[in-house]
Image (spheres, helix red, strand yellow):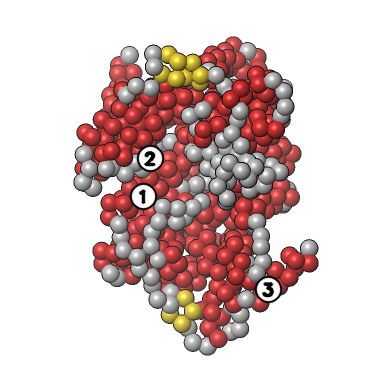
Amino acid sequence: MGDVLNAVLDVARSEVAWINAFTFAVFLAFGATGEWVAERAGTLNISVEAMLTGGAFGAAVGQDLSGNEVVAVLAAVLAGLSVAAVQAHMSHHLTADQFVVGLTLNIGVLGLTGFLDSAVAPNAYRASAQRIPVLADIPLVGEALFNRSWLFYLIYPLVPACWWLVYRTRWGLEARAAGEEPQAADVSGIDVNRRRRQAIYLTGITSGLGGAYLVLAVVGRFGDSIVGGRGFIALAAVIFGGWTLRGTIAGCLLFGTVLSFRLSLAPLGHELNGDLLASLPFVVTVLAMALFATRVRAPASLARPFVRGLK
Amino acid sequence: MKAEAEVGVYYLVSIAAALLLSAALVEATGGSWADVVGALLNGSVLKPGRIGLTIGVAVPMLIVALGTVISTRAGLVNIGQEGQLLVGAAAATYVGVELGGPGPLVVVALILAGVAGGALWAGVAAVLRYWRGVPEVLTTLLMVTIATQLVGYGLKNQRFLLAPADGRANRQQISEQLAEDRRLGRLVLLGNELPVSVFLAVALVALLSLVMARTVFGFRLRMLGSNARTARRVGVSEVRYGGAALVASGAMAGLAGAVMLAGGNFGNYTLVPGFSSGIGWTGLLVALVARQRAVSAVGVALVFAALRTGSGFLAATGVERRITNVVEALLVLALLIPPALVFLRHRRRAMGLSAEQLRDG
């Protein structure tokens, strides 16, 4: 136990560890913020993994073709949106099962990007950091939060914007109604499936940004397992957060930190078991669901398709 | 009859579209679609011995799909078969390697261990569902990764699954191989080797169809799935029947894992990280594409297995083998569209009728 305490203290005092932690956490947050909106509107959108992968590949290709980071990000968003379009229209237009569609997309997009990657082979590229003066001088976390690429900084406006959209706009109210009580929403004139589709599109956008951040600012090149199941961790973060945005972001920070231990601990001279650590986000989420099941509630119609006239 | 012909046309068109898209993708990247199709056919059926291989791969997919049929018919959404399968395979490995005794008995024991492992993994989700009200969709999905990591951990420790140091590379994560008398038999038929688990799978298809259609248990499960409120009113215990369905579907996935391990075709009778290799996910897709009918699942499983075994021959054509994942995904999407269109049409007609009735009073 003393060892663990020492390790945690060492990590907390290490600037590099903070940088690693926020690198992971922000990537998760890009996916999770959009996923949260989709889930509030009633879709358990497991294709967030595919959207992140698509976004990452889109960014790599866009950067390679144009040599411009903004174009690359737009390409990533476009890729995320294309995946979202399939998910949205298959599951909330054609009423196909959302899990089949999501699973299929996860398999198909991973295959497609891998296939195209071997044909196109985009060059490696790394976006440079833009240091924000003064703020970056904060001890310990300054570098981790304010000496980053502009792609990282996108998360700062994105999270409050999504909060505002969901809790303070008419669209948000309608989307939440679609996730809680679609029959009632339908009767009051809300196009339930349309709101759900739009929420999925939003996940496509944020995941596209996340993929772009991952490729351009973190890894530097596209690779097969670049997302490697982290889309599911983003999904777990939403559940862990009890379907609130605050909780979701807390989940991203916690899981990002835990996952970064793998990178951070070894240079500090600590050993740990990577497998058990990697399963921690999921174990914690399942436990949290079991413990707080009576207090925290999923959107009432989460993962239930809506067809007018059928209940 | 006319409506059925129409559905047939829908299917033809959407499958053709999926294949055309795949062809366009291959041609656009400089490959030859004809070569790809040739290689897929050679690898899955035409070359000697490949039919047996394809059937051998289809068996675990089919078993997973049958389990999915049980839980889905009961109105539950189990999407964690990949994890349940892996836990089943790990339990089977442990028993198959560690247990002493005569070979055939150990085979039975390891298969039962697989069943128990899968059932346990789904059982956690069932307990959380009915004791704490946690949606089973979420728990089954999240527990896939837990299973992967747990098995990975087991494969790093000689106390659990890792093979003794001699006979493997230093940091290799691999279990001890099942001894020869502890494997499922293989029978040779016209130059094709088939694991005997084929018979098990066929028997399970028959059994499941029978139980679902002809027994009180099956009836109650279906009632629970199609109208939970009615089921409660007539006294069908949600906990008992729903829980049983979820555990049974996990048990089937675990059985598939055990059969993969002891039947050959996968991992050469050893457990390695990534052993499940997407069979659980694919089995789930098989069930959903087969629209929860046990008999149609047989055909769908064979097609998906053929894509997988066929991809082994793609290397010679110079086309990336991951194209088969794309083809698989496009095919699934194509197979989803026709029934959805028909369903929507029916809904529209029904809605139109009720609107007329309202108007005419």
Which of the chains bears the disc numbered 3? A
Q: In the image, is A241 to the left or to the right of B195?
A: right
In percent of width and height, residue B288 lies at 47, 30
* Residue at x 50%, y 71% (from the top left corner): A156
How many labels, in total? 3
Q: Amino acid at mark 2?
A: Asn
- CA gap between label 3 and label 1 equals 39 Å
**Is B208 rendered above or below residue A161?**
above
Q: Does the residue at mark 3 contact the one at mark 1 (Cβ under 8 Å)?
A: no
Identify residue for label 3: A10
Q: Which residue is mark 1?
A: A114
Q: Nearer the viewer, residue B27 or A178?
A: B27
Is disc 2 on the same chain as disc 3? no
- Labelled pair 2, 1 in contact (Cβ < 8 Å): yes
Residue B230's image quarter?
A: top right
Q: Helix, strand, or loop for circle 3?
A: helix
Observer-nearest residue: B267 or A107? B267
Residue B141 makes an appearance in the image? no
Q: Position of residue A201 (x, y in %)?
A: 41, 53
Query: Do marks 3 and 1 share a subunit?
Result: yes
Question: The residue under label 1 is which amino acid type?
Answer: Gly
Name, please, the residue furthest toward the front.
B166
Label 1 crowding class (10 Å Cα cut-off): few <14, some 14-19, many 20+? many
The answer for which chain carries disc 1 is: A
Residue for badge 2: B325
User: Could you tell me which residue is drawn at 78 percent across and 63 percent down?
Assistant: A1
Circle 1: element type:
helix
Q: Is residue A156 visible?
A: yes
Q: Secondary structure at mark 2?
A: helix
Relative to B306, A300 lies left or right: right
